[in-house]
């Protein structure tokens, strides 16, 4: 389940990042565009028979002027979402689809709310036509869009045939269903048979929760009425956001402005005074051993105390010898501890490949 969720999120994040970078790279604000459009309309009406490059280009600032105008409109309109959906579909179709289909085949989804049944029906439809090579679902196949496909996906999911009938694009529908599935899994509207974290939400509650509802809510310090809970939460959010908005102008250590490096800039904190014993400790070390690199101090401390053995990997097993693992951990700790960075330390004189740090 974690793999399914993270994969769908990864496809969406990649699409978002790619489209954003392309729009930012091409975006250039066009000044006085209303006057430019008015002038374009005037010369077009005055010289309708002439070529565009002779009439429109001089008024619009040439090809570049029109390109900037189109890019600005694209950045401010729904073109961003359209492009994002295209990239999402491309990544899903060309790379991720086969793996996700295998995951869907081994997972069993359920819901305690009939409102989310269309998503479950959509999953069954995906598996039914998983090996199909057709662009559209065959005529006569019931494909539910409401409650499954978001509005920004519909223009890609629905196509008209020569007779004016609607045809559902199969791969686009699959993308929409997977997004809907992830949204509902995260709030447990849909759950997974045999799972732990993604189990039936009814199992999260004590078996006598309904019988002792009033007592349980009192213990949780929550109101019984859902509307009362949400209204209190909304009021708290409004109050805290208003307090933040009021406090921001008076914070001399915070700047918020438009800049390429980021809108929010925090003033660096004042350096703390050096601990009294640190200088004496340094002098004692120099007097006894001479100038010693910090990595050597770290290495001796690690070898004498065995502290690095407390670190455990995220995998289920590991095959690295202890000596190699300790060396890599030392390099990583040195990179972060000295603020040198992994890239600098990885390029040092040692046998470990940069990609392994």
Image (cartoon, rainbow, N blue to C red):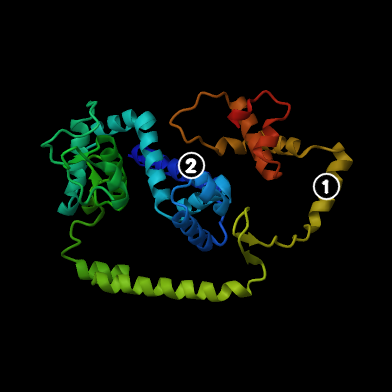
Q: Is 253 on the left or on the right of 150, as rendered?
A: right
Residue 304 visible within the image: no
Q: Is 219 on the left or on the right of 86, as rendered?
A: left
Q: What is the crowding at mark 2: few (fewer than 14 residues within 10 Å), some, or many (at least 20)?
A: some
Occupied quadrant, residue 323: top right
**Residue 350 coordinates in the image, percent (x, y):** 70, 25
Q: Find disc 1 in the rendering and name its residue.
A: 282
- The residue furthest left is 140
Quadrant assignment for the C terminus = top right
Residue 85 visible within the image: yes
- 314, 302: nearer the viewer: 314
Q: Is residue 260 above or below residue 308?
A: below
**Residue 295 coordinates in the image, percent (x, y):** 73, 37
**Residue 5 coordinates in the image, percent (x, y):** 35, 42
Identify the residue at horizontal 59%, vertical 29% (top origin).
355
Identify the residue at horizontal 66%, vertical 36% (top origin).
343
Q: Is 241 on the left or on the right of 92, as rendered?
A: right
- 353, 323: nearer the viewer: 353
- 310, 186: nearer the viewer: 186
Q: Is residue 83 above or below residue 251?
A: above
Q: What is the crowding at mark 1: few (fewer than 14 residues within 10 Å), some, or many (at least 20)?
A: few
Q: Find disc 2 in the rendering and name its residue.
A: 18
């Amino acid at each position: 389940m974690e793999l399914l969720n993270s994969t769908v999120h990864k496809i969406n994040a990649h699409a978002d990042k790619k489209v954003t970078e392309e729009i930012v790279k091409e975006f250039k604000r066009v000044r006085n565009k209303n006057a430019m459009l008015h002038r374009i309309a005037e010369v077009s009406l005055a010289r309708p028979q002439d070529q565009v490059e002779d009439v429109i280009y001089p008024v619009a600032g040439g090809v570049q002027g029109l390109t900037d105008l189109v890019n600005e409109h694209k950045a401010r309109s729904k073109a961003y979402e359209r492009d994002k959906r295209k990239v999402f579909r491309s990544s899903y179709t060309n790379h991720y689809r086969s793996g996700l289909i295998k995951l869907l085949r081994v997972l069993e989804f359920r819901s305690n709310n009939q409102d989310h049944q269309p998503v479950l029906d959509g999953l069954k439809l995906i598996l039914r036509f998983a090996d199909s090579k057709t662009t559209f679902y065959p005529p006569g196949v019931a494909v539910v869009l409401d409650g499954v496909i978001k509005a920004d996906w519909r223009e890609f999911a629905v196509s008209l045939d020569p007779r004016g009938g609607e045809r559902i694009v199969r791969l686009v529908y699959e993308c929409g269903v997977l997004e809907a599935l992830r949204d509902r899994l995260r709030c447990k509207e849909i759950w997974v048979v045999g799972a732990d974290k993604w189990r039936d939400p009814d199992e999260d509650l004590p078996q006598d929760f309904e019988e002792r509802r009033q007592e349980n809510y009192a213990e949780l310090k929550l109101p019984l009425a859902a509307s009362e809970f949400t209204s209190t939460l909304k009021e708290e959010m409004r109050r805290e956001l208003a307090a933040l908005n009021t406090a921001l102008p008076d914070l001399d250590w915070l700047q918020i402005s438009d800049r390429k490096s980021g809108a929010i800039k925090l003033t660096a904190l004042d350096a703390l005074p050096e601990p009294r014993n640190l200088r004496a400790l340094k002098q004692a070390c120099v007097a006894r051993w001479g100038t010693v690199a910090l990595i050597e101090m770290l290495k001796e401390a690690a070898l004498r105390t065995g502290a690095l053995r407390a670190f455990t990997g995220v995998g289920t097993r590991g095959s690295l010898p202890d000596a190699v693992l300790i060396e890599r951990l030392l390099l990583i700790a040195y990179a972060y501890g000295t603020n040198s960075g992994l890239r600098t330390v990885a390029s040092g004189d040692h046998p470990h490949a940069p990609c392994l740090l």
